Amino acid sequence: MRLPKIKTINCKGFSLLELIVSISIISITSSFVIPYSLTWLRKEKVNAYTRELSEFFRLIRLEARRWGSSCFIYTNSFDYDSIRDDKKYMGFVVNCKYTSTPYDSSKINVGRIQELLPALNNSFFQVVNNNFQVTPNGRISASKPIVVVIGSKYHKTRPKILNCITISIPTGQIKKGKFNTNSWLLDNMPVSQLSSNAILSPERCEL
């Protein structure tokens, strides 16, 4: 009785040389892709916060006009890298009141407008030059035009992005742009701060 022939299949695997070449290609590609992806992500966080904050300022003006109230916007201060993941930190406090007296606590109505504020995180920072008031007709009351500069925590390396928002007085016109100088920035910028630095002027915010 003859036994059937067993078919043998030749399975060729990767040689050591092919494996080394493949790993090298993946490593080289990753060295370009990963830094680019991180830069894009950091840049997008700055841009997203800038867009959301700009729209929030517009919303405050609408809120004040709708209810005939005065809204006072104060800047919150947070140190470098001080934002915890388990809490929501806001860069501003918004008090909308039906009185012209800023410190009449009996008539404070924060309302739901505060809940719409975009949250801060440690990957970017903001610098504000002045607190301000939105009047019942939607105009801005402040000692000087409002400038908010927003940048990446990694501004010394990449991405070197520095956005800005300006609010003109008294009209309240809101504009977004790029701040044209970064020589005043520190290595460890606070996440949020109120600053009287004269460099924070609307002229430096290029549209």
Image: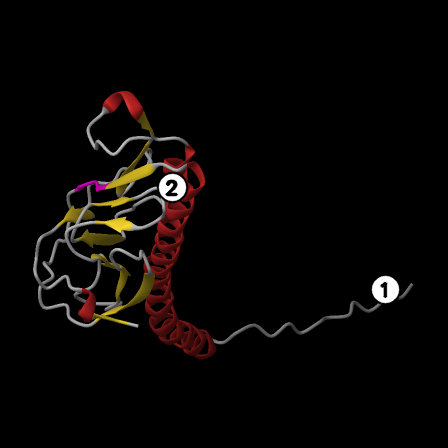
User: Dividing the picture into quarters, in which one does residue 8 lie?
Assistant: bottom right
Magenta highlight range:
74-78
Q: Residue at x 24, y 57 (%)?
A: 169
Amino acid type at mark 1:
Leu
> Percent from the top left, x then y, of residue 36?
35, 70
Against 104, is 30 above or below? below
Q: Nearer the viewer, residue 161 or 81?
A: 161
Amino acid type at image mark 2: Ala
Give yes or no for residue 4 being in the magenta stretch.
Answer: no
Q: Is residue 77 above or below residue 108?
A: below
Image position of 15 (left or right of 2): left
For the stretch drawn in magenta, the main secondary structure is: loop
Furthest toward the right, the residue is 1
Q: Secondary structure at mark 1?
A: loop
Residues marked 2 and 1 touching at CB (< 8 Å): no
- Tag 2: Cα neighbours inside 10 Å, few (<14), some, or many (≥20)? many
Name the mark on residue 64. 2
Counting from the top left corner in percent of width and height, residue 93 is at: 27, 37
Q: Is residue 192 above or below residue 149?
A: above
- Mark 2 or mark 1, which is nearer to you? 2
Residue 27, x across and y down, in percent = 37, 71
Nearest the viewer among 41 and 61 is: 61
Front residue (pair 123, 172): 172
Quarter of the figure with the N terminus? bottom right
Q: In the figure, residue 103 lies in which quadrant?
A: top left
Q: Earlier in the sequence, mark 2 or mark 1?
A: 1
Report helix, strand or loop for mark 2: helix
Write down the residue under mark 1: 3
Quadrant housing the C terminus: bottom left
